[in-house]
Image (cartoon, helix red, strand yellow):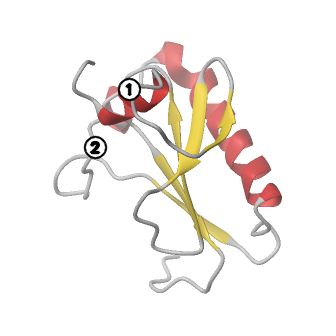
Amino acid sequence: MSDCIFCKIVNKEIPSEILYEDDNILAFKDINPVAPVHVLVIPKKHIISVNDIIDQDVQVIGNIFVVIKKLATQLGVAESGYRVVTNTGKDGGQVVGHLHFHLIGGKELGIKIG
């Protein structure tokens, strides 16, 4: 998608602080962090949201969570804890129309769910 900011980051048209990259996944620091650790982990393939995941995407989505686990360890939040968030649609708070997962940690996080 030519107007998608995350696709532009994947294509290296917009600079970002990349923490992980492979053929299918990219992880980079959020430019507006809400915690000391705030990383966005995305599929390189343009998938708009959770609602747009298809059967062929299952492996890459699963691998995203393996990458999140590795990053949490690398960034020193695996033991103390962290949050993984994805927003879907306008009412869910999704701002960028490209599926992404927020890895947030490094401090005690506010709202507790579950």
Picture coordinates of residue 86 (x, y %)?
A: 42, 52
The residue positioned farthest toward the top in the image shown: 56
Picture coordinates of residue 54 (x, y %)?
A: 42, 19
Q: Residue at x 66, y 76 (%)?
A: 106
Identified by mark 1, the residue type is Cys
Taking 11 as reference, is 69 left or right? right
42 in relation to 40, above or below = above
Q: Residue at x 81, y 56 (%)?
A: 74
Residue 7 disc label: 1
Q: Work out which quarter of the rendered image holds the N terminus and state it.
A: top left
When asked about the image quadrant of residue 72, the answer is bottom right
Identified by mark 2, the residue type is Val
Viewer-nearest of labels 1 and 2? 1
Number of other residues with Cα within 10 Å of mark 2, as a class: few under 14, some 14 to 19, many 20 or more: some
**Viewer-proximal residue, 105 or 61?**
105
Residue topped by disc 2: 96
